[in-house]
Image (cartoon, grey):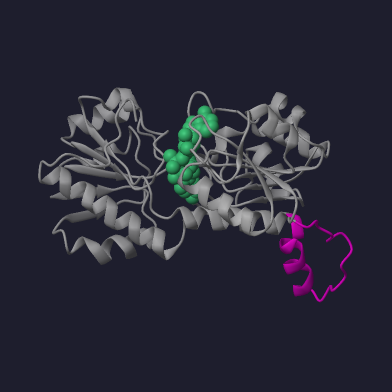
């Protein structure tokens, strides 16, 4: 069975090549992102493997169907970039619902420690033999309140880490966990009472721009915002304004709402045209990374193994354990 693999990076190949021999599939790797224009590369393949910043909209799905692709295998958990309604009855969609919640949760804590304790500044200073500490003061995380939005697999691991630091946890989720060792509150209460807010819910119509001017206005002065989930959970313009006004003291952003145009590529020789991203990247109290929270060896192994096993189920005509359906 032939598989067209889109948006390939060297680390993807290493882990898929390691396991594909066990399945006997033939993979054709393409660096291009999957969209309506590049779908033609999948002609003759039964499966298209895609990632977070591919555009699998109605037009792309129609092309994939026309070219004989029966399965879109997302090698990620989120599927907000797939038009699931358009796919229904045309191509099946599977994903990797969990590959390492630890990878993302640990990275989120890394971002918080960096922003709060200014590790990024210390690294740059000492490289120039500047051993001055002015401006590097942070605060103890112990005893502070962290608001966690979304208490699924990643959110719960992150909460465990925060509790290990002696932090108080306020949580908000549409579906609270029973007997949780932390308090569930309304989103408004979380905004009003948290020293740090970390987002771990999916991007849906309901969560789009949930951190907007109104939500920010309700937050404590000097709050830190962390987003390792999906960029469009935050209205970036409102975030930038609040950072300029010092309402928000710092932000750790592993995702950005217009990231598909930039992330995973080297633009270092180019003048970036997205003024909001350019400004955020340059603020001393903001850490922007390129959607890398998942990037551990364990996660990449699990992604490759689950994706290939999802494809095997499809090839064998078995029920698809990790199928994404309209109600998923
Ligand atoms: P999950 O499905 O286990 O948990 C998501 C939680 O969000 C669930 O408890 C759900 O009830 C809750 N939720 C849904 N809608 C909500 C709403 N409107 N308000 C509040 N809570 C809501 O997912 P997960 O594995 O924990 O992943 C969380 C998110 O992390 C994913 O959706 C994905 O966008 C992101 N992610 C990012 C990376 C990265 O590399 N940066 C990697 C993996 C996942």
Front residue of this view, candidates 180 and 150: 180
- Residue found farthest to the front: 179
Residue nearer the viewer, 287 or 57 = 287
- Residue 40 in the magenta stretch? The answer is no
Q: Residue at x 67, y 54 (%)?
A: 112
Residue placed at 19% from the left, 40% from the top? 43
Q: Is residue 272 left or right of residue 39?
A: right
List x then y, in percent, for residue 211. 64, 31
| 147 left or right of 230 in image | right
Q: What is the quadrant of the C terminus in the image?
A: top left
Provide the residue span drawn in magenta. 116-140
Tell me if residue 241 comes above or below residue 14 in the rendering: above
Q: Give the x, y percent position of residue 234.
A: 62, 33
Q: Position of residue 185 (x, y in %)?
A: 63, 32
Q: Quadrant of residue 182?
A: top right
Q: Position of residue 244 (x, y in %)?
A: 81, 38
């Amino acid at each position: 069975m032939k598989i067209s693999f889109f948006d390939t990076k060297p680390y993807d190949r290493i882990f898929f090549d390691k396991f594909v021999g066990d399945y006997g599939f033939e993979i054709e790797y393409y660096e291009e992102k999957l969209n309506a224009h590049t779908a033609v590369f999948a002609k003759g393949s039964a499966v298209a493997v895609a990632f977070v910043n591919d555009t699998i909209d109605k037009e792309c799905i129609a092309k994939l169907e026309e070219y004989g692709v029966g399965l879109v295998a997302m090698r990620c958990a989120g599927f907000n970039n797939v038009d699931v309604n358009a796919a229904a009855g045309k191509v099946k969609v599977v994903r990797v619902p969990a590959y390492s919640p630890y990878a993302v949760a640990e990275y989120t804590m890394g971002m918080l420690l960096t922003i709060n304790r200014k590790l990024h500044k210390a690294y740059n200073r000492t490289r120039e033999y500047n051993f001055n500490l002015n401006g590097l003061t942070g605060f103890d995380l112990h005893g502070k309140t962290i608001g966690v939005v979304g208490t699924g697999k990643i959110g719960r691991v992150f909460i465990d880490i925060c509790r290990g630091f002696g932090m108080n946890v306020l949580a908000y989720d549409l579906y609270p966990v029973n007997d949780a060792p932390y308090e569930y509150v309304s989103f408004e209460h979380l905004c009003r009472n948290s020293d740090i807010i970390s987002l771990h819910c999916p991007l849906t119509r309901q969560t789009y721009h949930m951190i907007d001017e109104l939500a920010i206005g309700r937050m404590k002065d000097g709050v830190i915002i962390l987003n390792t989930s999906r960029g469009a959970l935050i209205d970036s313009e409102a975030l930038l304004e609040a950072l300029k006004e010092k309402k928000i003291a710092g932000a750790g952003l592993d995702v950005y709402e217009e990231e598909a145009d930039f992330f995973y590529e080297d633009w270092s020789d180019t003048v970036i045209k997205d003024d909001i991203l350019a400004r955020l990247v340059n603020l001393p109290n903001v850490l922007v990374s390129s959607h890398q929270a998942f990037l551990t060896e364990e996660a990449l192994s699990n992604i490759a193994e689950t994706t290939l096993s999802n494809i095997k189920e499809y090839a064998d005509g078995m029920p698809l354990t990790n199928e994404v359906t309209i109600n998923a």
